[in-house]
Amino acid sequence: MFNHIVIGSNDLERAKQFYDAVLGTLGAGPGMPNQAPSGHSRLFYRHNGGVLGISQPINDEAATVANGGTIAFKCTSPEQVKLFHDTALAHGGTSIENPPGLRESSLGAMHLAYVRDPDGHKLCAVYRVQAAAPSA
């Protein structure tokens, strides 16, 4: 469904240090520097067909967070969810909501961790627990 997501940062070097480390836990490489036609700096992270952009706001106003917005990253195991969370904290992120762990909901069982990046954007690491196959 999505091609890319772009969020703003007020300190692109700080954002690069944070996202290089955190997205590295998912297997993404370092952010690729880029310059918008307007001259503003930005970074692009590519992984498994998706793109996350971190950009200086092109309107020259301060970057702000989306109230109610969350960017969720798919993990391959509960351990990767925890590693994402812990790496985020070690690189200037803040843990929010419940501690990382298993949650049951109408959407099924998931291991989740929620953090805010240094600019305040809400991120989620998620691993969906596979339902057991019905026995024959």
Image: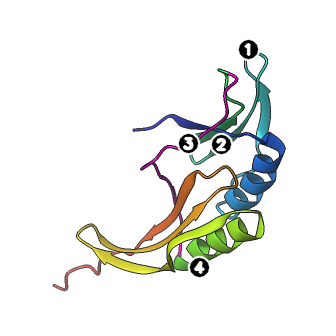
The residue identified by callout 4 is 79
Q: Earlier in the sequence, mark 2 or mark 1?
A: 1
Query: Quarter of the image containing the C terminus?
Result: bottom left
- Main SS, magenta region, reads loop
The residue identified by callout 2 is 46
Q: Which residues are magenta?
A: 60-77
In front of the other: 70 or 26: 70
Secondary element under disc 2, as helix, strand or loop, is: strand
CA gap between label 2 and label 1 equals: 22 Å
CA gap between label 3 and label 4 equals: 22 Å
The residue drawn where x is 79% and y is 17% is 39
The percent coordinates of residue 73 (x first, y second) are: 53, 57
The residue identified by callout 3 is 50
- In the image, is residue 85 above or below residue 136? above
CA gap between label 2 and label 4 equals: 22 Å
The residue type indicated by label 2 comes to Arg
CA gap between label 3 and label 2 equals: 6 Å
Instruction: Give the residue furthest to the left.
Output: 136
The residue identified by callout 1 is 38
Q: Residues within 10 Å of mark 1 (few under 14, many from 20)?
A: few
Whether label 3 touches label 2, CB < 8 Å? yes
The residue drawn where x is 70% and y is 23% is 60
Question: Do we see residue 30 in this rendering?
Answer: no
Q: Residues within 10 Å of mark 2 (few under 14, many from 20)?
A: some
Q: Earlier in the sequence, mark 3 or mark 1?
A: 1
CA gap between label 3 and label 1 equals: 24 Å
Secondary element under disc 3, as helix, strand or loop, is: strand
The residue type indicated by label 4 comes to Glu
Secondary element under disc 4, as helix, strand or loop, is: helix
Query: Quarter of the image containing the N terminus?
Result: top left
